[in-house]
Amino acid sequence: MQMYHINYHKPKVTLLQQTGIGVSEIAGRTCYDSFDNSENQSIKDRDYPKANDIESSELLDSLAWVHHHHSIIEHTNLSFLVEGTSRACLQEHARHRIQSISVRSTRYTMSSVINAFVASLEAKDEFGFFFDRIMDLDLFIISDREYLVIEVRAMFDKLYLQYKRVDDFISISVAKSSIEFLATYKDNPLSLFQALENGKKKRNVGDAFKHIVTDNWKVDMVITFNLRSLKNYFDLRDSGSAYFQIQWLAKAMKEVLPIKYLRLIDKESRG
């Protein structure tokens, strides 16, 4: 059977900060009172400001791969900026308990979508206008146009039903200072859209419209793991049995991770 091929955007990952592995070795040396045994001079000399510059640690390697004692590497932390993963992937990601995560909010960032819908009500081809504006916003992981016609049509239909049934639709959609634009640019949907975009944004506009959001929506997020939790994440998510989009994300995170961390958590990187 021939499968229908769908095009996807893959996520971009940037390593924002890294604490180094020095604190983890210091923690291990503290446990065993073995500072003098370190091959790293800064550790041996208790030169703590320079300790996080070390590139390897025999102690950490032994604890990780011989004794499988990983609690020490919890003292190492890494933060990543993830751009362009999906809300479906976010749901999988949130199942990892020990992480800090901050995600692009639909409450505060849906104004352009709602502005496009409000402006489309002045267009002869309401859906066509809405679709074109939404495509300009680059909101989705799946990039296949045929698929997106279906998805954006569903968004439009849900918004239109709400518009027909909610008496104060405009007041929950548009900032009070921008309502005058509806009369100023009547029958000129593009000018109306641009005026709404340049005007004051409606605060928390997403509260009334989250129902249109699908798992295909792009999200950006900043995530921070300690190295032990990151090992667990890679063990589970860089795996053929994981959801394919979170496999992409795990691989992209690995690609930006310096080797000194990978050597402690990834067998294939030990060299």
Image: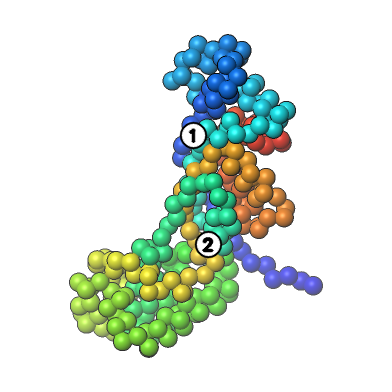
Q: Position of residue 239 (x, y in %)?
A: 70, 50
User: Which three-letter amino acid code belongs to the residue tagged 1?
Assistant: Gln
Q: Quadrant of residue 55?
A: top right
Which residue extends farthest right? Answer: 1
Can residue 141 be seen?
Answer: no
Can residue 76 be seen?
Answer: yes
Nearest to the observer: residue 219 or residue 99: 99
Q: Residue at x 69, y 71 (%)?
A: 4
Q: Quadrant of residue 265?
A: top right
State the residue position of label 2: 87
Decide: is 64 above or below 179.
above
Q: Residue at x 60, y 34 (%)?
A: 71
Q: Position of residue 19 (x, y in %)?
A: 48, 31
Decide: is 60 above or below 254.
above
Query: Which one is earlier in the sequence, the residue at label 2 or at label 1?
Result: 1
State the residue position of label 1: 18
The N terminus sits in image quarter: bottom right
SS under mark 2:
helix
Q: Position of residue 130 (x, y in %)?
A: 42, 77
